[in-house]
Amino acid sequence: MKRLVLTALAFAGLAAPLAQAQTAPAVTVYSSRIEQLIKPLFDRYTAETGVKINLLTDRGGSIAERLAAEGAGSPADILLTVDMGNLWSAAERGLLRKIDSPTLNNNVPPNFRDPGNQWWGLSRRERTIFFNPEKVKPAQLSTYEDLADPKWKGKLCLRTGKQTYTQSLVAHADRQAR
């Protein structure tokens, strides 16, 4: 299975290795990013390198199911996701393979990449806590961990726990707490 997983802007970190790999006339990218937002980047890359990019976009879960169905015969070279949860899930399902890339390892800090070299991330989303300062003192609700306090039960507006963004938020908070 020839797969490399990256998040958000990670494709830019791969530009130099791909430009040197002129033996491949095309790169197939499966992406859960909004096509209108990433296609200009890919078009520019093609114009500068001559390497054509075949782009397939869909929701993260749908792309993972497609990769699983295609198995080793998948044409995907790169999986571009919008969320850490999708990366973790794809790795857990065995949909990714290890890639030895000195360029990525030298340019992406260890905390933004998989220890097994199955994915690299070059962007992150900030999760901001909003509250009414007339009802809540900032010290009461200033960290992600504070959200778990039972006193907030029924008083928070959050996405469902089944949503990958929420799972990533909780996993990140847990990692930061360690």
Image (tube, helix red, strand yellow):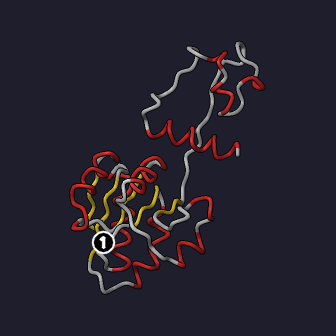
> Up-down: is 7 above or below 50?
above
Locate residue 152, reporting x and y percent: 63, 17
Looking at the image, residue 170 sits to the left or right of residue 143; the answer is left
Locate residue 142, reporting x and y percent: 72, 30
Of the 4 image quadrants, the one containing the N terminus is bottom left
Looking at the image, residue 119 sits to the left or right of residue 22; the answer is right
Looking at the image, residue 7 sits to the left or right of residue 59; the answer is right
Q: Quadrant of residue 78?
A: bottom left
Locate residue 29, reporting x and y percent: 32, 63
Q: Residue at x 36, y 79 (%)?
A: 49
Q: Quadrant of residue 59?
A: top left
> Up-down: is 120 above or below 173?
below
**Viewer-closest of 64 and 56:** 64
For label 1, the SS is strand
Identify residue for label 1: 27
Q: Residue at x 44, y 40 (%)?
A: 164
Q: What amino acid is labelled 1 in the image?
A: Val
Local crowd at mark 1 within 10 Å, few (<14), some, or many (≥20)?
some
**Viewer-closest of 68 and 27:** 68
**Viewer-closest of 157 and 178:** 178
Q: Residue at x 58, y 67 (%)?
A: 108
Looking at the image, residue 57 sits to the left or right of residue 151; the answer is left
For the image, the number of numbered tags is 1
> Up-down: is 156 above or below 39?
above
Q: Residue at x 65, y 22 (%)?
A: 131
Locate residue 77, reporting x and y percent: 32, 68
